[in-house]
Structures are given as C-alpha cells and as structure tokens.
Amino acid sequence: MSDETPVCSAKGCRTAAVWVLAWNNPKIHTPERRKTWLACEEHREHLSQFLGVRGFLKDVVRFEDWREPEGS
C-alpha cells in the first residue's frame, strides 16, 4: 500500500478501500450533492448501516467503478 492508496473511512482502519459509499445529509446538502466515505470489505456493511438508518446513504459502488458526479 502506498501513500496514494485510498483507505477505509472506519475509525482506526488503515485497510485499502474497496467500496465508495455515496451519501448526503438532506438538511444541509442539495439533493444532487454527494459526499463519500470509503470502505474496506470488513466495514462496508457497518458504515452503510450507519448512514442508512439516518437516511443519508444514496449509493454503494465498487471503488474501481466510482465516477464523481458532475457538480459535486
């Protein structure tokens, strides 16, 4: 893993990211805005649930398939 390797967003995890979790908080972001968290295989479900119960999770995409939406 190099300094440029994206890592999981879970607290304390330094594992390479495999997933992009796209989300937004509708109270503060416009509907088209997407914030992202990165996740390894181990933390994908936990981070998805955390965002999901708050109604923030919009999409989960494999890292290699992720394309930043225009205007984000």
Image: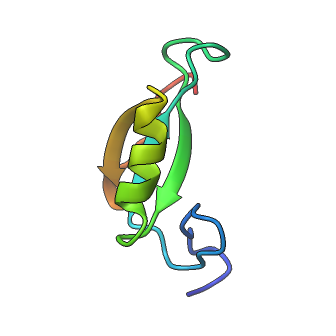
Color scheme of the displayed model: rainbow
Q: Is residue 19 visible?
A: no
Q: Residue at x 49, y 76 (%)?
A: 16
Q: Residue at x 64, y 66 (%)?
A: 11
Residue extending farthest front: 53
Against 65, residue 34 (above or below) is: above
Residue appearing at x 47%, y 39% in the figure: 51
Eyeballing the image, is 1 above or below 11? below
Q: Position of residue 19 (x, y in %)?
A: 38, 58
From the top left corner, tell me how far across and down residue 45 is, in percent. 35, 57
Give the tally of numbered discs. Answer: 0
Which residue is nearer to you in this view: 61 or 12?
12
Compared to residue 9, the image places residue 70 above or below, namely: above
Quadrant of the snapshot with the C terminus: top right
Question: Where does the image place residue 1, in percent across and percent down from the top left?
Answer: 55, 87
Q: Nearer the viewer, residue 54 or 44?
A: 54
Query: Residue at 32% across / 48% down in the picture?
Result: 61
Q: Residue furthest bottom?
A: 1
Kindly indicate the quadrant of the structure image that contains residue 8.
bottom right
Residue 57: x %, y % from top left: 42, 34
Q: Is residue 16 visible?
A: yes
